[in-house]
Amino acid sequence: MSLKHEIDKNRLPKHVAVIMDGNGRWAKKQGFKRVFGHKKGVDAVRQTIEAAVEIGIEALTLYAFSTENWNRPKYEIDTLMSLLVSSLKKEIGTFQKNNVKLQTIGNIEKLPKKAQRELDETKEKTKNNSKLTLTLALNYGAREEILNATQNISKKIVNNELKIEEIDEKIINSHLYTFNLPNVDFLIRTSGELRISNFLLWQIAYAELYFTEVLWPDFNKEEFYRAIINYQSRERRFGKTSEQIEKRN
Ligand code: FPP
């Protein structure tokens, strides 16, 4: 039986972020080239989106391409970009059927024009969807995001649109790429690596972290449900004592 039935729909994380890792190792293990792992990884992306929709997650953010990924061989970068384009073309129907809104974080102006066009089109077509906000992090780095926010806040100060004393967490949140998303409640990383790798550094301040040995191409709906069940087994205290949390409930 599916693990889905063990999930408490009243205690879901609002925003789940995923570092999809292990595509290359998965492919090597089977004797294939690394890019084959990325191709198989697209199926895991689809399963994760569907699972999130099925249980009612509001926001899902996937780390699809980091600012550091430009250092990979050109052939691998080209494959990732064309997989992005073909997946968007292929999945637009699924997005509409499942009421999924697509958005991106990161500097997508550096992506190939074809990828930018496909992203813009898919964003436009799905902009009124409201069940799940799917955010793809593309050419994304958290330090770059914080730098960008700092520059934009500074510009407002110089232009007298904002006072230094007015800068608070809300102002910072509203200048991040994730301005329209709730804080991350749950961060999943596959493939056994225990790192954050410059992903959503500000937003994960209180997130529960989940690391699994499963390589990304083997990740699927059941693995996603397993992760959510693990999240629900934890007590989130936000700095308070257990007694304070009990009283509130
Ligand atoms: C990490 O595996 C994965 C990536 C760098 C990219 C993730 C991309 C996909 C799953 C496919 C395309 C995405 C979309 C949204 C359609 P790795 O190559 O770092 O694995 P390794 O650590 O084993 O080398």
Image: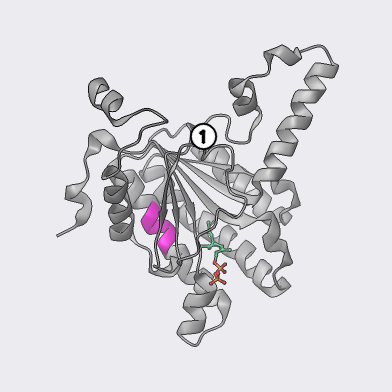
Q: Camera-side residue: 54 or 119? A: 54
Q: Camera-side residue: 81 or 225? A: 225
Q: How many marks?
A: 1
Which x, y percent locates residue 217?
Answer: 43, 69
Display colour scheme: one colour
> Which quarter of the figure has residue 80?
bottom right
Residue tagged 1: 127
* Residue depicted at 57% across the width and 59% down the height: 84
- Characterize the local packing of mark 1: few (<14), some (14-19) or many (20 or more) Cα atoms within 10 angstroms: some
Q: Is residue 173 magenta?
A: no
Residue span colored magenta: 44-48
Q: Is residue 43 above or below residue 239?
A: below
Which x, y percent locates residue 52?
Answer: 35, 47
Query: As shown in the figure, which amino acid type bears the numbered disc 1?
Result: Lys
* Residue depicted at 50% across the width and 69% down the height: 22
* Residue depicted at 58% across the width and 37% down the height: 202
Q: Which secondary structure, mark 1?
A: loop
Residue located farthest toward the left when viewing the structure as drawn: 1
Residue 175 placement, left or right of 32: right
* Residue depicted at 72% across the width and 44% down the height: 144
Magenta: main secondary structure: helix
> Which quarter of the figure has residue 47?
bottom left
Residue 109 placement, left or right of 50: right
Q: Quadrant where the C terminus lies?
A: top left
Q: Quadrant of ligand 1?
A: bottom right
Residue 130 placement, left or right of 6: right
Q: Is residue 77 above or below residue 97?
A: below
Q: Camera-side residue: 91 or 156? A: 156
Which x, y percent locates residue 200?
Answer: 57, 43
Which x, y percent locates residue 54?
Answer: 29, 46
Q: Is mark 1 within 8 Å of ligand 1?
A: no
